[in-house]
Amino acid sequence: MSTEESDPTGSVVSMLMNPSRGMANWYAGLGMLGIFLAILNIFGEIHPTYHLSWGGLLTFEATNAAFGTKSLDGAQFVLSDAVFIGFCIGLSGIGFRTINNDEEGIADWFKGLIINDTWPALVDPDLGGWNKLFGAWSLLLGVVFYFFYGIAYTGWIDVGVYSMSIAFIAFGLALLMAANAPEGDDNLD
């Protein structure tokens, strides 16, 4: 028997607090989206008629109601906004810490969101095949649809908008991963 005992709780916490580069991308992206939505909620621009309680929404109304009345006086800041913003800042911070420890750093990460091999494939199927072309278009349509609907109809938290956006984005990411996957062996025997 070894002298080192495995502690599954310690390894899970370590994994969450020191994510891989791929997971750090998700941490940073979701954290920034959460901060953006929290700011919209404070200024009453997340929904046409409701002010959102993050505690109620994320606990499926076990702690309190998820939707409250919107203040007509302007900005409305409640405790759940502070907790949610703090959580999102922490999530982004963990992600950006991992990204910053990488050799490219945070500046190249932001640059890589715009300048990468996905967006040129929007107009040229020879750059990665049809999977990459349709994947890039699907990813772009999902993001544009979410932001268009949010801006035009103040529907940033609409379930239907999330469903459509996530379907496009997930399909696009799947096609992009399929296009970037290495080719397998020709001999399947």
Image (spheres, grey):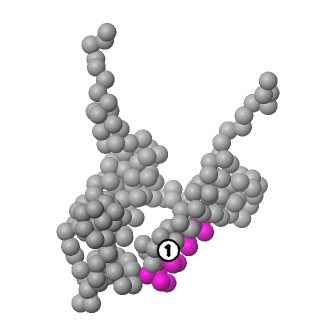
**Left or right of residue 156: residue 72:** left
Quadrant of res 53: bottom left
**Residue labelled with disc 1:** 147
Quadrant holding the N terminus: top left
Is residue 103 at least partly visible in the picture? no
* Residue 56: x %, y % from top left: 29, 66
Q: Residue at x 43, y 81 (%)?
A: 154
Quadrant holding the C terminus: top right
For the residue pair 49 and 170, the one nearer the viewer reads as 49
**Left or right of residue 149: residue 82:** left
For the residue pair 68 and 179, the one nearer the viewer reads as 68
Amino acid beneath label 1: Phe
Q: Report if residue 153 lies within the magenta region.
A: yes
Is residue 87 at least partly visible in the picture? yes
Q: Report if residue 97 lies within the magenta region.
A: no
* Residue 164: x %, y % from top left: 56, 68
Q: Residue at x 50, y 74 (%)?
A: 147
Bounds of the magenta span?
Answer: 139-154
Q: Residue at x 47, y 70 (%)?
A: 159
- As helix, strand or loop, the secondary structure at mark 1 comes to helix
Magenta-colored segment: predominant secondary structure: helix
Instruction: Spot the residue most to the front.
Output: 62
> Are there few (<14), some (14-19), or many (20+) residues within 10 Å of tag 1?
some
* Residue 46: x %, y % from top left: 38, 77
The vertical placement of 156 against 113, above or below, is below
Q: Residue at x 50, y 67 (%)?
A: 162
Instruction: Spot the residue most to the left.
Output: 79
* Residue 183: x %, y % from top left: 72, 37
The vertical placement of 150 against 13, above or below, is below
